[in-house]
Amino acid sequence: MAWHWILTKRIIIWMGTAVLLSLLFLANGRAHADPLYNLSGVMRDGRGSAVEGVAIRFYCSPLQQEYTVQTDVNGYYSTDVEPCQYEARITNTSESTDYVPTITYLGDSQYIDVTEGDIVQDMMLDTSLVTVSVKDVNGIPVSGVDVTLVATGNGVSDLIPGEIPDAYANRNGVSNRLTTDENGLAVVSALNGLDYSVCAYTRGGINICSPTEIRPLADGSGNVAEVNFPQMHTISGTVYGANNQPVPNLYVSFGTSPAQAAYTGAFVTDDLGHYSAELLPGNYYGHVGTIGNMFSEHTPRSFSLIDSSRIDATNSDVVLDFTLDVSAITVTVKNADGSPHEMAYAELYATGIGNTTLFGNNPLGAYAPNDAVTVSQGFTDDNGQVTLLVLNGMQYKSCSYDSNWENYTCAPMTFIAGIISTTEVVFP
């Protein structure tokens, strides 16, 4: 048996030696691992001013490693990286300034070699200012409209000074937006060498673009653009609610279809319930809705109130008042034993059936939306009651959450608003 013990002992010694050598090898490997080098520099704009808030992404393809760093108030960035050749990529700026465009994503630059030691690499957003003039169909300057430059993806812009051949093209995201002054002018920043589409938004939220693109250059050529608005028509009027009272803070919007009308740029009624929309000539559908979850004593709490019939603004301006034919419904919420349910969240939910008057002068042309988005909601009081406003002529369903938001139940019957004034929800 002695030889078995000797053999076992030798195996144990051999295994112990192997483990020790492995540990020494790993320790030696760590001791001689590739060091981290520092990559730093300053980002400047076309005037040589420091650019704050630019995120720079350095990517090493062989190592599948990336580092992202943001420039500080002095335009300075610094990060420690593993030895590699890195692609530099600007991912975004926090916000546009008078000389730096908002940047959501740019393409790749040439490689920065960080294999021999620390590197100081300054960068430059090669920018210049573009003056955009906006005029109406009669050549009169249009003030107070937003102007934007959107890169089309063509052209190249320098990132590393002196490396124009290795510069990179924007792919999908340089834009900037400013508002025209009293002379119809807006001065916006852009990256030199990129092609831009120059657009302006009418007061009706319609995007009008110049038929030709521009390519700003450092020498000033291509740094002037003009957008000409076509003939516009105005639809204006007042929104009235209960007791023929003007309703402030409502959205009024228009579209070429009922669905589009509910999701296009909107105009907010003022303190006197007045709105004014400047639109291209055409036929429109109108839409009235509340702002967020806001409501007043004259309107239901609702994200969407009602759509209109078609409005003809083809040949002239239109004056059109909207009348929200509303009434109050008292909702009573009870427990199974008939006791009032306090702090229940009751709602009257439109089913999409029925008609309601929206135009004061054209009730037959109005119609109810068919997507059941008109809702009035509120918490019940100590008596389990809440009074909610609804649009007369529309069918509603009475429902409620309990005070713990755990159960939801509805009344078995729907009702037509304007015919009844009370409804009841009972939890099982």
Image (tube, grey):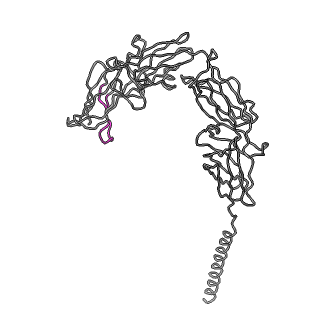
Q: Which residues are magenta?
A: 398-413
How many labels were placed on the picture? Answer: 0
Residue displayed at 74% across by 38% down: 156
Residue displayed at 69% across by 56% down: 39
Q: Residue furthest right?
A: 165
Q: Residue 272 appears at what percent x and percent y?
A: 40, 21
Residue 328 vertical placement versus 100 (above, below):
above
Residue 266 vertical placement versus 21 (above, below):
above
Relative depth, front residue between 6 and 31: 31
Relative depth, front residue between 421 and 96: 96
Q: Residue furthest front?
A: 182
Residue 412 vertical placement versus 93 (above, below):
above
Q: Is residue 297 left or right of residue 281?
A: left
Q: Residue furthest bottom?
A: 2
Instruction: Tell me the quadrant of the picture where the N terminus can be found.
Output: bottom right
Instruction: Tell me the quadrant of the picture where the C terminus can be found.
Output: top left
Relative depth, front residue between 265 and 136: 136
Q: Residue 423 appears at what percent x and percent y?
A: 26, 26
Q: Residue 36 appears at what percent x and percent y?
A: 67, 61
Residue displayed at 65% across by 38% down: 99
Q: Is residue 94 magenta?
A: no
Quadrant of the rendered image containing residue 333? top left
Q: Is residue 24 left or right of residue 425?
A: right
Q: Residue 218 appears at what percent x and percent y?
A: 74, 36
Quadrant of the rendered image containing residue 330? top left
Quadrant of the rendered image containing residue 290? top left
Relative depth, front residue between 37 and 73: 73
